[in-house]
Amino acid sequence: MISKEKQKEREIDMSNRVYDILKYIAQIVLPAIGALYFGLASIWGLPYAQEIVGTITCIDAFLGALLGISSVQYKRKNGDV
């Protein structure tokens, strides 16, 4: 069992405003940028479309995982889970 002090150290601590901004970036901005670049790359022959969109997708998935962990921790902390 992890002590409360160690558990507190491992928590992701962010304000509601930061969470909301990161959530907006993860749900709207990054997918839109990826789709825009992929579409323009196929029309105009821009380089590395698959690599760039793949990188954006990986970053977005990682950000989504961090936000999910943060959400679960927040709910546990406030007795919602």
Image (cartoon, helix red, strand yellow):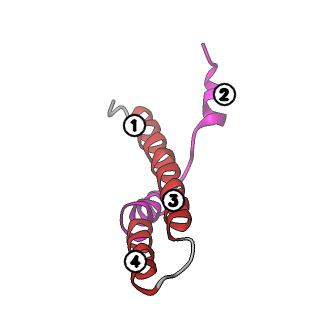
| Image location of residue 69, percent across then percent down | 48, 40
Q: Which residues are magenta?
A: 1-29
Q: CA distance from mark 3 to mark 4?
A: 13 Å
Q: Which residue is mark 2?
A: 5
Nearer the N terminus, badge 2 or badge 4? 2
Do labels 3 and 4 touch, CB within 8 Å? no
The amino acid type, in three-letter code, at marker 3 is Gly
Q: Secondary structure at mark 1?
A: loop
User: On residue 50, which mark appears?
Assistant: none
Q: Tell me the quarter of the image containing the N terminus.
A: top right
The reply to whether the magenta stretch includes residue 28 is yes
| Above/below status of 80 relative to 47 | above
Question: Badge 1 local density, few (<14 within 10 Å), some, or many (20+)?
Answer: few
Nearer the N terminus, badge 3 or badge 2? 2
The amino acid type, in three-letter code, at marker 4 is Leu
| Image location of residue 53, percent across then percent down | 49, 65
Q: Which residue is mark 1?
A: 78
